[in-house]
Image (cartoon, rainbow, N blue to C red):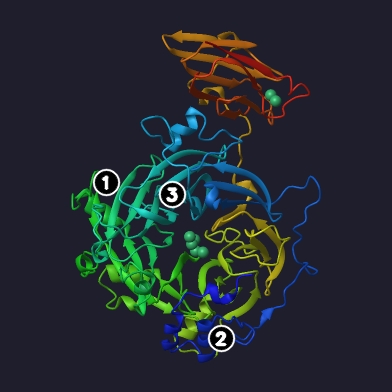
Amino acid sequence: MKTETQLIPPGSNALARRSFLSAAAATGLSLGVVACADKKSEGAAVPASAPATTAPHGAANVHLKPGELDSYYGIWSGGHTGDMRVLGMPSGRELLRIPCFVPDALVGWGITNESKAIMGTKPNGDLRYNVADTHHTHASYKDGNYDGRYAWINDKINARVARVRLDYFICDKITQLPNVQGFHGIFPDKRDPVDQAINYTTRVFCGGEFSIPLPNTGTEDASQYRSMFSCVDAETMEVRWQVLIDGNCDLVATSYDGKLAATNQYNIEMGAHYEDMMSAERDACLFFNIARIEAAVKEGKFKTVGKSKVPVVDGTRESNKDPKTALTAYVSVPKNPHGVNASPDGKYFVCSGKLSPTCTVLELTKVLDWFDGKLEKLDAAIVAEPEVGLGPLHTTFDGRGNAYTTLFLDSQVVKWNVDAAIKAHAGDKTAKYVVDRIDVHYQPGHLSATHGETMAADGKYLAVGCKFSKDRFLPVGPLHAENEQLIDISGEKMVLLADHPVRGEPHDFIIFKRDLVKPKQVYSLDDFPNAIKDPKESGVFRQGKKVTVKMTSQAPAFSLREFKVKRGDVVTLILTNLDKIEDLTHGFAIPNYNVNFIVNPQETASVTFVADEPGVFWCYCTHFCHALHLEMRTRMIVEA
Ligand code: RUQ
Ligand code: CUA
Ligand code: CA
């Protein structure tokens, strides 16, 4: 079993210099002893709740009766599987995986021509990438709440952003960001900064975490490296503009008025090694003035980098010292922060400390005042620095004025009151801001309350993604599941409701009310330009070596009982599922030809392959559809 020591960043004893970290806690951190019960910090009057294995009377019941539907959707990042997972909440039942960045054998994602066109291919037709690392997923907004149109998800490895349509729960577009490595934080905007009548998402902001030479010449001198903050158009998915910055981007948050976006920076040192990245006592929360950036782009005040044509404006410190013209504002916050989250009242961003036991509360009107020349010191935008515990990472909200922050090192979620923290910061000694703590299992990263990142935060449930499960599940060899836990936050005290093992490693998720989306369960034939609308259109159509096979499916038969092609033909097989009733999906597999995909009701999909192996190949339906499902076959005869 992993010891706590291995989880502590080496050199963390540097923290002992921080005045607000008690000596005992600092020793605990450097020695890797997590002794949350002993830890007494200012405002921390409440001990951790006893671990609950079952919900006490009054707490929400997560065990739905057979046939009962969940009240919330959970949209989960898929981690290394490069997909988006859809869960029913509060049960935690996994309902769907939406493939995006990585091939998926059930759907035939990465096999069909339609999915390959979205994923991107090399000139020879092979997929450009087979790996991904998704971290964050967020949905489109209208009037401060989700509107059920889209969700976006990032691929950190290859700097890609995928869009998922929430009408069909499918990925429809993927964009790769130019001149970015380690694309980490992502957040849609919530309103237009200038035209406030546009009260919905039209931009998606993407934070570049790793600094690289721009253009990427391969130079070793890391002080020359820079990062980019990118804006992607929510509709076209084209990259609108980028901002060249000092330091790096980690997570991203956006304001409800659309005027500000921010990213937390852990590497203002622009170091290439971890010691360098934690050498400064403070890093920054970097704010972007969206209206000014777009005005600069309009006025042509940009350059381009490398082969990319995307306008890049200058957001570096040196060029943005004058508040009246600044595009960016670097607010100094404690060492190597992680996570930045917008409170549902629209007033604050909360930046977590990670290597500082504090959260930093930033008041957005003050940041705007600085840009307007009305606030002299940018530091004055910091209105609270509550001491919450060790290793604070992410924060979510209940809509009743409370924030919930994960404590990675303490293995806890801490509930704290934002107004009380502001009062304490202003000198009110009686203000107790820590409301409750609960042990989680173990080392939590993200957490998300129901509608927590919207103005409609309803404070019912909170899910927390624990990076280590250790002893919580049956052992299955060296690779442990992660543990997603569900907590009832409807009362004063948090109550642990359930553990769920998950395959690594989802990172982030959002949870919203089920009536927000009305998914369609049958496609329209017109959605597909190549649909075969009548079985009579079926057949083999030859143009030299190029052969098109058109076929339809209707349980329990394909429209062609057999079809013939010649060895060496380039075959494109188009299949339309003419079955109209929901839940009637067919599959299509060709032995030895690496083909398997599904067609949902009224869906069309196609595959292209070279018929390089002569013989008889039984193409069969792979999705159980009918009592005669096994009999649902057709023969491909490849003539030598
Ligand atoms: S990060 S555990 Cu990739 Cu979301 Cu904070
Ligand atoms: Cu069609 Cu099984
Ligand atoms: Ca740092």
* Residue 449 position by quadrant: bottom right
Q: Quadrant of the N terminus?
A: bottom right
Closer mark to the observer between disc 1 and disc 3: 1
Q: Is residue 79 visible?
A: yes
Q: Circle 2 sits on which residue?
A: 43
Q: Tags 1 and 3 in contact by the CB under 8 Å rule?
A: no
What separation in Å lies between label 1 and label 2 (alpha carbons)?
Answer: 48 Å
Q: In the image, is the residue at mark 2 within 8 Å of ligand 1 by its beta carbon?
A: no
Q: Secondary structure at mark 3?
A: loop
Closer mark to the observer between disc 3 and disc 2: 2
Q: Circle 1 sits on which residue?
A: 310
Residue at 54% x, 58% y is 507
Q: Position of residue 412 (x, y in %)?
A: 61, 74
Q: Position of residue 464 (x, y in %)?
A: 61, 64
Q: Residues within 10 Å of mark 3 (few under 14, many from 20)?
A: many
In screen coordinates, is 46 left or right of 122?
right
Amino acid type at image mark 1: Val
Q: Circle 3 sits on which residue?
A: 201
* Residue 578 position by quadrant: top right
What separation in Å lies between label 1 and label 3 (alpha carbons)?
Answer: 21 Å
Q: Position of residue 552 (x, y in %)?
A: 60, 17
Amino acid type at image mark 3: Thr
Q: Earlier in the sequence, mark 3 or mark 2?
A: 2
Q: Is residue 97 above or below residue 599?
A: below
Q: Tags 3 and 2 in contact by the CB under 8 Å rule?
A: no
